[in-house]
Every structure is written in structure tokens, then in C-alpha cells.
Image: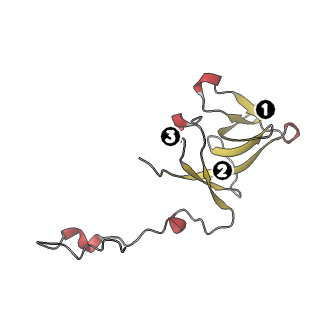
Amino acid sequence: MSGYAGDRTTGFASPAADSAEGPIDLSAVLDLYRPNRYPVRVVGDALSARGILHGDVLIVDTAASPRTGNVVIARWQDQTIVCEITRNRNGWFLRSGRSGDGHTLRPVDGDQDAGIWAVVCALVRTEV
């Protein structure tokens, strides 16, 4: 099945036909050809306040440097979690998005089996 090109209409030609875009290559748009970019599916709703919902696909970059406010994929005590990262004078902390846990801050400390794996750089929603 081919995509709609805008040139096969009935009646009159669409005035928007001149600006019809060709197929969109999501791999190119999301820069998935880079070896450090990966799609990751979200399980759970911990960051729904940030617009990240269960079932969404996050595009993550393992080479990106985290900054305060970034959403990251992190390891915390043998769990892989999606959370926000923040920095204060005491170091880096992972902040849960769940309002029920008081937005708990967890220190990022290699000695505590905690670390950042990747920074989230895009979100793909497969259902609206």
C-alpha cells in the first residue's frame, strides 16, 4: 500500500498539494542511526505528571550528559527506573514523579548501586 501523494483527488486539485510532505522516516527524525540511541518502552505511570504515560516509547541517549530537570533512565538498587534528575550542593539526586511518595530524592552514588544509564531525548506515543 502506498502513501497518499495528494495528486489523486476527485473534483479539483488540492491547494495544499504543493506543500505535501513525503513519507516521514522516524528513524531519521529521532536520530536512531546513532549507536548510542535506543527506544525504551515505559512500564508504569510514575512520570505521568511530566506527560510520560504507560506504554510510551522513550528515545534515550546513553552518551548524553545529564542536566538538572532531565528525565533519565537510571539504576537504583538493582531496579531500572525512569525518573527526573536534579543537582544540589550535595550532589546528584533521582526524583520520582509519583506524588504519593513525596517526590523522594534518591542519591546517585556508585557505591549505592545507583547511576544514570541514559538521558531521555524524545517521546513517541503509539496510542492517542
Percent across and percent down for residue 112 are 85, 36
Q: Amino acid at mark 3?
A: Gly
Q: Which residue is mark 2?
A: 119
**Residue at the spot 54% in from the left edge and 41% down from the top edge:** 54
Say which label, 3 or 2, has the lower sequence index.
Answer: 3
CA distance separating discs 1 and 3: 28 Å
The local crowd at label 3, few if under 14, some if 14 to 19, many if 20 or more residues have their Cα within 10 Å, is few
Percent across and percent down for residue 51 are 50, 40
Say which label, 2 or 1, has the lower sequence index.
Answer: 1
Q: Quadrant of the N terminus?
A: bottom left
Horizontal arrangement in the rendering, residue 21 relative to residue 24 (left or right): left
Q: Which residue is mark 1?
A: 90
Horizontal arrangement in the rendering, residue 36 relative to residue 4 (left or right): right
**Residue at the spot 19% in from the left edge and 72% down from the top edge:** 9
Q: Amino acid at mark 1?
A: Asn
Q: Amino acid at mark 2?
A: Val
**Residue at the spot 57% in from the left edge and 65% down from the top edge:** 31
Q: Which circle marks residue 51 in the picture?
A: 3
Q: Quadrant of residue 97?
A: top right
Indicate whether 125 appears above or below 43.
below
CA distance separating discs 3 and 2: 16 Å
Q: Disc 3 vs disc 2: Cβ atoms closer than 8 Å?
A: no
Q: Which circle marks residue 108 in the picture?
A: none
Q: Quadrant of residue 77?
A: top right
Say which label, 1 or 3, has the lower sequence index.
Answer: 3
Q: Disc 1 vs disc 3: Cβ atoms closer than 8 Å?
A: no
Number of disc labels: 3
Percent across and percent down for residue 73 are 68, 46
The way the protein has been coloured in the rendering is secondary structure
Horizontal arrangement in the rendering, residue 22 relative to residue 16 (left or right): right
Q: Secondary structure at mark 3?
A: loop
